[in-house]
Image (spheres, rainbow, N blue to C red):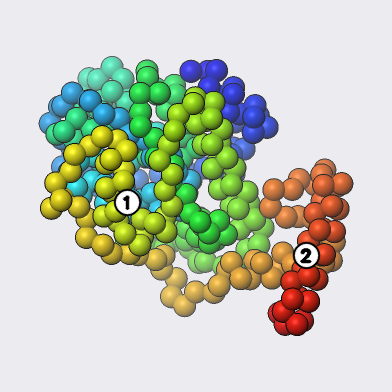
Amino acid sequence: MDFLLRIVTVGLGGGTLESDFMGTDTSEKRSETATSGPWQRQFDPVYDFPPTLVTTKLALLTTPRCGSHFLGHRLRETGGFGYPLEYCNSGNWRHWRHRAREAGAAGVLDYIKSVRTGPNGVFAIKLHFEHLEKFLAEEDDPLSYVFVHLRRENLLAQAASFARAQQTGAWISDMPERGAARYDYDLIASKVTAVATGNAGWEAFLAATGREALQMTYEQVARDPSAAVRAIADHAGVTLAEASLPADFAPERQKSGKREDWPAMFRAETEKRLRSGQFALPGLSQGDTSKKERLVDWARMRLDDLRGASGGRD
């Protein structure tokens, strides 16, 4: 599947997936907690299923902090989608490789399928774009999957959540915070670019392969988890009992007590930087001078228009 990687990476500027596309490899942060605590639960054999022939394969195409953890657990609760997890996350892969070796299995992903395919024959996996290279290297038939592309409508809120999780080490609601959360413009800017690039990568992958993915947003899932699960089941051709559908409740927010409005702070600082001629903005490298100048001119005119329309109010 090297040709798929070439198509996708060349179209997005080349480079390695983990370093260029996601900025910070989230697996490094997650693997720190993979030896104990909430994150370790995913490797527990108690969540395994008896060996079952795989008849349907589902891939959730995601980016960090897009709501995939919440959706994956809602899918698992139905009993119809196996246990969708980030099996190709480099930190998690080491644990699965250890389990596979202990079981005498030849291939890690084949072993994962043997213990995490649901009784109805459905195997599901969550993939951030940084996991694509591992997935293509390990999966013999990647185009046999049914795809769901999950994203958030509010990119900046997602980037702020991504930055907060990286700072605190709390990637899921019941993980303890190991660091303090503090507003950091440059960190949030890097996450804006990382998430946007990850979503663009998935769009490039789908376009290159000619596959149609079910498009879904975090906000849709949060508003009506049952409807989201039904839509995925219909897309994948999975039959679910009505009684198995998840109860409608919202995802838990990250901790940190009283929270500053990082997206509002970020927008205000971006406006300030634009007006002062600073160019360290998401999506722009220091060499894109003409592009930056055009953007600044456009932004200044647009801001003036908006202020005029609001009577000069902020």
Report crowding for label 1: few under 14, some 14 to 19, many 20 or more residues within 10 A (C-alpha). many
* Dot 2: element: helix
Q: Where is residue 232 in the image (x, y as percent from the top left)?
A: 31, 43
- Camera-side residue of 294 and 5: 294
Q: Check disc 2 and give the amino acid type.
A: Arg
Image-quadrant location for residue 155:
bottom right
Q: Which residue is drawn at 55% across and 18% down?
A: 3
Task: Give left or right: position of 128 versus 121.
Answer: right
Q: Residue 168 carries which label?
A: none
Q: Residue at x 26, y 62 (%)?
A: 248
What residue does disc 2 label? Answer: 302
Residue 127 visible at all: no
Q: Check disc 1 and give the amino acid type.
A: Ala
Q: Where is residue 124 in the image (x, y as percent from the top left)?
A: 30, 36
Image-quadrant location for residue 114:
top left
Q: Is 241 located above or below residue 55 in the figure?
A: below
Query: Among all residues in the image, which is located at the extreme front?
Result: 309
Q: Which residue is drawn at 42% across and 28% down?
A: 135
Q: Position of residue 211 (x, y in %)?
A: 45, 29
* Dot 1: element: helix
What residue does disc 1 label? Answer: 228
